[in-house]
Image (cartoon, rainbow, N blue to C red):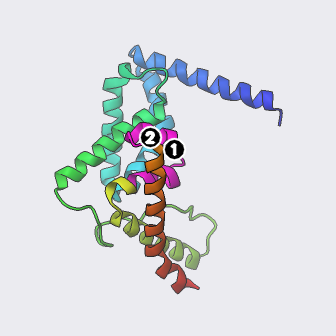
């Protein structure tokens, strides 16, 4: 592939998004609707991974974009839309933690199954195993401290860069790396018994 063509395509995409954001900031509801269409799935998956509840994730996704609609004028060119939306969603997630007034470790009964795998073209046995593994991962995530869960989800499941995660969390990159390393160790420890049982 021609690198110059790729660069132009990337630049065109950025310019297009900048234009949509500018229209949304001027009160264009259709433009904001395009932003919602493009980013709502990403935000939903983030909240879902953090809280493990479908209905609550849907509700907080709607609240995230309602907050974004009200505050779109504060979004500056240097602030990436995705990280800005994630920051709003993160604040809602942490507000939910505080309102629950309890430690957020969850049992199997508390968590819906995380859909981390595409179940298409799988045999029934494989679909069952994927569902079972998703449940194990969901429970393991629920047992991480909320700050480490946040970092793990943003990096390992949402594929954000350390810089983006630092912008969202306000945590310095060296600490992010340390916390992610520890979160990975804990996740690996919790998931290992299930993986060994499948051998």
Q: Are marks 2 and 1 in contact (CB under 8 Å)?
A: yes
Image coordinates for residue 36, horizontal then vertical, percent: 44, 34
Q: Is residue 139 magenta?
A: no
The answer to which of 72 and 168 lies nearer the viewer is 168
Most extreme residue toward the front, as rendered? 174
Image coordinates for residue 133, horizontal then vertical, percent: 49, 72
Q: Callout 2: few (<14), some (14-19), or many (20+) C-alpha neighbours within 10 Å?
A: some
> Taking the image as drawn, is residue 111 in sight?
yes
Residue 3 falls in image quadrant:
top right
Real-space Cα separation, disc 2 to disc 1, in angstroms: 6 Å
The answer to which of 2 and 55 lies nearer the viewer is 2
Residue drawn at (50%, 49%), measured in percent from left and top? 158
Q: Which residue is mark 1?
A: 162
> Taking the image as drawn, is residue 45 in sight?
no
Specify the quadrant that holds the N terminus.
top right
Specify the quadrant that holds the C terminus.
bottom right
Most extreme residue toward the right, as rendered? 2
Image coordinates for residue 179, horizontal then vertical, percent: 43, 56
Task: Name the secondary structure under disc 2.
Answer: helix
Which residues make up the magenta segment?
A: 149-172
Q: Which residue is mark 2?
A: 166
Task: Name the secondary structure under disc 1.
Answer: helix
């Amino acid at each position: 592939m021609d690198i110059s063509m790729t660069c132009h395509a990337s630049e065109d995409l950025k310019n297009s998004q900048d234009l949509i954001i500018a229209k949304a900031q001027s009160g264009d509801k259709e433009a904001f609707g395009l932003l919602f269409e493009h980013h709502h799935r990403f935000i939903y998956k983030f909240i879902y991974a953090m809280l493990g509840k479908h209905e609550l994730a849907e509700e907080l996704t709607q609240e995230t974009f309602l907050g974004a609609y009200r505050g779109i004028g504060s979004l500056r060119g240097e602030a990436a839309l995705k990280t800005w939306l994630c920051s709003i969603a993160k604040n809602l997630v942490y507000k939910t933690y505080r309102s629950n007034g309890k430690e957020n470790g969850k049992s199997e009964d508390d968590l819906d199954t995380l859909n981390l795998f595409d179940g298409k073209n799988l045999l029934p046995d494989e679909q069952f195993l994927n569902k079972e593994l998703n449940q194990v991962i969901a429970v393991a995530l629920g047992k991480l401290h909320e700050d480490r869960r946040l970092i793990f989800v943003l990096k390992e499941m949402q594929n954000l860069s350390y810089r983006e995660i630092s912008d969202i969390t306000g945590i310095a990159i060296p600490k992010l790396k340390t916390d992610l390393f520890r979160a990975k160790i804990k996740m690996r420890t919790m998931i290992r018994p299930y993986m060994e049982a499948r051998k």
